[in-house]
Image (cartoon, rainbow, N blue to C red):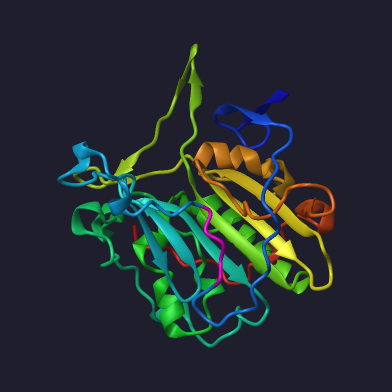
Amino acid sequence: MHRLVTFAAGALLGGGAMYTLTRAKDTAKPASVPVPAPMPAPVPVPMPVPRALPEASFQDASLKYGNPGPVSDFLQRSRYAASYNRALRNPNWVAEHLTQANLKGPADRATSEFKEDPQIPGPFRALLKDYHRSGYDRGHMCPAADAKQSAQAMNETFFLTNIAPQVGKGFNRNYWASLESFVRDLTRSFDDVYCISGPLYLPQKEGDKWVVKYEVLGSPPNVAVPTHFFKVILAKRAGEQAFALGAFALPNKEIDNSTPLESFSVPIEMVEKAAGLQFFDKIERKAGVVAPLCAKTQCTLDHDSWKRKKPEQKK
């Protein structure tokens, strides 16, 4: 039996498009995943996208001279793992494992600089010049503040493969920053926190049609501007059987700080369908195994706790 679930930007995403998705009531998954011990690097984060089959496994004669793809670049850094989209020049997702221990360290972002990622072939890279005078911030998916353990870890968060265009005032420098702080603060009440962040490109209704519209930065056009961003969070306390699971989808626009975080809470299946991804699929989503994050902890943002305002980023 199926039911229609309405992904409404007005009610759930703070205004914009309405996105209608169909999902099954029950989504049985394989057996539960063991929680990795806190760091060392590289971070043991679950991959939300199946790895591509090796090229050798494609035996069709039409591919004799090469498989055109698509290619999804998998990147493993000191503090995060990521999948990069060569067509949109943005991450598909960026995954982190957070604990109280691995959030500590001496690194300072003041010495870090944004940089193009040499692991991506030149024609498919996001470029520094794409953001120049664009009017958008270079928004982190894995925040720099999550990578204080070393200068290398901090610097790796400034690769453009960890970055997507975000509205600055009221979003990247404010509401999104407070959400990042909320995720870090979860390590005070959970022993292990897994967070997967990424962009969305959601349709909006125009007359009797659904249309996907987004700006593209650069000359020539190169980097897509997401309409929304998501964070999917899995958390666990030592000694407890159940995981806490939550998903949030926010519009890439100025958001008033008075807007409750729970107004952006959506079923994880909605984000999966919109992004074409599967999150934490080794965990069976049923009572006793998974509980709603906002039922296990208070899902509120403390905007005053963001004492150090994000510096104005070069456009």
- The correct choice, above or below, for 186 with respect to 218 in the image is below
- The correct choice, above or below, for 19 with respect to 230 in the image is above
Could you tell me which residue is drawn at 63 percent across and 31 percent down? Answer: 7
**Residue placed furthest toward the bottom:** 106
Start and end of the magenta stretch?
44-48
Could you tell me which residue is drawn at 50 percent across and 41 percent down? Answer: 275
Visible in this render: residue 133? no
Location of residue 197 in the rendering, given as x and y in whole percent from the top left corner: 54, 55
Assess whether residue 46 is covered by the magenta stretch.
yes
- The correct choice, above or below, for 187 with respect to 226 in the image is below
Q: Quadrant of residue 174?
A: bottom right
Foreground residue among 230 and 259:
230
Foreground residue among 129 and 84:
84
Could you tell me which residue is drawn at 64 percent across and 47 percent down? Answer: 248
Location of residue 175 in the rendering, given as x and y in whole percent from the top left corner: 60, 54
- Majority secondary structure of magenta residues: loop
66 to the left or right of 47? left
**Residue placed furthest toward the top:** 208
Assess whether residue 136 is covered by the magenta stretch.
no
The number of discs equals: 0
- The correct choice, above or below, for 222 with respect to 301 in the image is above
84 to the left or right of 188? left
Location of residue 289 in the rendering, given as x and y in whole percent from the top left corner: 79, 55
Q: Name the quarter where the C terminus is drawn.
A: bottom left
Q: Name the quarter where the N terminus is drawn.
A: top right
Foreground residue among 120 and 283:
283
